[in-house]
Amino acid sequence: MAEIVLERVYSIRLKHKMKRYPRWLRAKKAIRYVRRFLSKHMKTDEDKIRLDTKINEKIWERGAQKPPTKIRIRAVKFDDGVVEAELLE
């Protein structure tokens, strides 16, 4: 069983990053931005990040053109480098 090394809660602002993309790409880019954000702050590779399905559903719930302006995420890093993220709300 992997042990927890680090556990943090992040409030990720998506609004300032998503305005630069065309409307039909915003939700897709938001998911990618969340992965990059977590890899930077938790110091691991993007392919070792496991996003909960509720994060995906929250970003896509109003369609591809209108992702939420910010989301709160709880991220847990294990000793093998895998990061699991879940939605808080």
Image (cartoon, grey):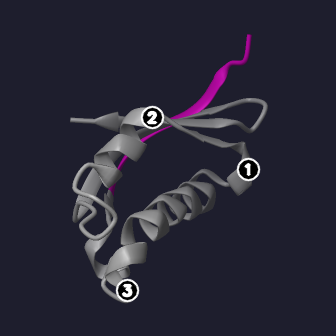
Residue placed at 23% from the left, 60% from the top? 68
**Residue 30: horizontal and vertical position, in percent?**
42, 65
Q: Determine which residue is flagged by label 2.
A: 53
Look at label 2 and name its amino acid.
Thr
> In which quadrant of the rendered image does the N terminus lie?
top right
Secondary structure under tag 3 reads: loop
Mark 3, other Cα within 10 Å: few <14 / some 14–19 / many ≥20: few
Look at label 3 and name its amino acid.
Pro
> In which quadrant of the rendered image does the C terminus lie?
top left
Q: Relative to 69, is 22 above or below?
A: below
Q: Is residue 46 left or right of residue 30?
A: right
Which mark's residue is nearer the viewer, 2 or 3? 3
Residue 86 shows up from this direction: no
Residue 18 counted in the magenta span: no
Q: Determine which residue is flagged by label 1.
A: 47
Q: Relative to 20, is 8 above or below?
A: above
Residue range highlighted in magenta:
1-11
Q: Is residue 31 left or right of residue 70?
A: right
Q: Determine which residue is flagged by label 3.
A: 22
Camera-side residue of 57 and 88: 57
Camera-side residue of 8 and 30: 30
Rounded to the nearest whole Å, what is the CA distance between mark 2 and mark 3? 24 Å
Residue placed at 60% from the left, 51% from the top? 42
| Mark positioned earlier in the residue sequence (2 or 1) | 1
Residue placed at 37% from the left, 35% from the top? 54
